[in-house]
Image: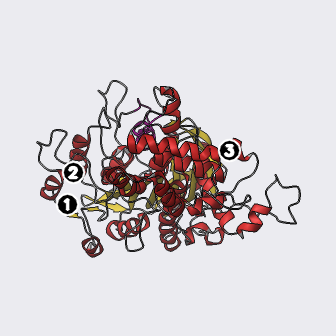
Amino acid sequence: MKKVFCAALAATLMLTGCSQTAQNQISETQKTDSTTASQTTVGGELTPISSTIAITEASNGENTAVTSAVPKYVFLFIGDGMSYPQFQATADYLGAMGMDEDEYFMAQPSLDDNEGAVLDGPSALNFMNFSAEGTAVTYDSNSFAPDSASTATSISTGHKTYSGSINVDETATVSYETITEKVHDQLGMKVGIISSVNLNHATPAAFYAHQASRNDYYEIGLELVDSGFEYFAGGGLKKTTGSDGDQENLYDLAAAAGYTVVNTQADAEAVTDGPVIIIDENLSDSDAMEYEIDRTDDMWSLADYVEKGIEVLDNDNGFFMMCEGGKIDWACHANDAASTISDTVALADAVQVAIDFAEEHPDETLILVTGDHETGGLTIGFAGTDYDTYLTLLNRQKISFQKYDDEYISAYKENGTSFEDVLKDIEDLFGLKTSGDESDKPVLTEYELGLLQTAYEKSINDTDTDMAEQQEYAAYGTYNPLSVTITHILNNKSGVSFSSYSHTGLPVAVFADGVGAESFDGYYDSTDIYEKMASLLGIE
């Protein structure tokens, strides 16, 4: 796996100024009158106010004004599918990579003599050291293992709904106004929406759209155009001419509505203001951005889009930016641990841009990092490795499962590539070998070779596996049998495993730093993320 060393990963780079909270906050029981609006209207225009004014009665009977800062700049980072296992596995992997591999392997508990080797421990991602940390329960109106549409609805509106629905109630007859719509309309804040997957996919859509089905991509795209938000960036729009291909192109509609539509990096670099829609130049699967493990240095990262977003959005009234690391979820669905870790690091890189911005605006910025749900049932630990982990083995993986599918398996089918030649590619791209020293961890066992042979025959020659239907689904899910078998074997040799190809009911972490961060401490429902943001911003 491509090594990523970024400032976002070290605890020493933690923001200090941003983590300071307002000093003169008063409790509700002390208030006799207050105004919660962070703006006032002067001459018909919204004029920013940097603080809330609360009126208290002093002991001498006189009213005293006490100021309590409210965030002018809000960054909400959502790692789609990211719960505790995803960021902890990433931190553990980075910690292991910081050690000499021989010493790391020597520290394993299965050895009778560790020869003095000691595990250094995890290397925390930047947001793991934020000043406040809460836990949010993610269930929706019909599942304890919810989907992205409903969980993003909880975060953006404070309401539960059915899986698959976006910002509407369970009857699909009532629409909910999102926090981004409210800050845009009530406070005059500019709004930016960034995603490494499609901009009309469920999570980004939950900040501007209202649809009974997340699959109504064209209708969601129409709402994107109508939103008036100043900055959209990342993956391409799905179904740009409708499900039947007979509708006016969404990009043309956006241009007619006043958006600058950009789809090259050169043009993106020249953008200085909005409204703008920037589509990544190097789209891959389903018109999403590349997996971080496949991204080359000349391609824009999620962090680049956050940096450009700040440039476009910064203004006297402030801004609200939502940035989704969507391919964490896609990698977990496919049970690709190495790609999961790479995209979690990419999200931390994006968070670092916000941290750097907050250092310049320490009394005005709130940064939140959370997930919408957990995906894949990722576990640090595997039955076959007992208490041992060999996480550095994941570094042998050079490409994502998707790139392997697109560039290699398709060629195998076309060319009738032999199993022996396929094994050579597997060694080169994933580090799994057919021979080597007995202590060489990446060497495949006879059992593992058998799994690969069966998967190869199923993938390339469509040969029956002789498995029961349920057994075959457990082995492959809906993914290519060969690629998912490769990642399963590498995962398990590394000491990690997945229990699902879908979502799970694990709660998610909520990390907060900056103005009002302490509000996000505790254990609560994901709808409370909205309530806490709304309360801090003073919106109705």
- Residue 262, horizontal then vertical, whole percent: 23, 65
Give the camera-side residue of 70 and 480.
480
Give the camera-side residue of 55 and 368.
368
Secondary structure state at the residue bearing disc 2: helix
Q: Which residues are magenta?
A: 145-163
Q: Are marks 3 and 1 in contact (CB under 8 Å)?
A: no
Q: Is residue 177 visible?
A: yes
Q: Is residue 532 visible?
A: no
Residue 157 belongs to magenta span: yes
> For the residue carrying disc 3, how many other residues have a C-alpha within 10 Å: few (<14), some (14-19), or many (20+)?
some
Give the camera-side residue of 334 and 53.
334
Mark number displayed over residue 225: 2
- Residue 101, horizontal then vertical, whole percent: 71, 67
Front of the two marks 3 and 1: 3
> For the residue carrying disc 2, how many other residues have a C-alpha within 10 Å: few (<14), some (14-19), or many (20+)?
many
Relative to 396, is 135 above or below? above
Measured in 3D between alpha carbons, the distance from the residue under mark 3 to the one under mark 1, in whole angstroms, is 50 Å
Q: Which residue is mark 1?
A: 259
Q: Are marks 1 and 2 in contact (CB under 8 Å)?
A: yes
Secondary structure state at the residue bearing disc 3: loop
- Residue 340, horizontal then vertical, whole percent: 52, 54
Q: For the residue marked with disc 3, what is the amino acid? A: Phe
Mark number displayed over residue 382: 3
Mark number displayed over residue 201: none
Give the camera-side residue of 425 and 49.
425
- Residue 403, horizontal then vertical, whole percent: 40, 57
Q: Quadrant of the N terminus?
A: bottom right
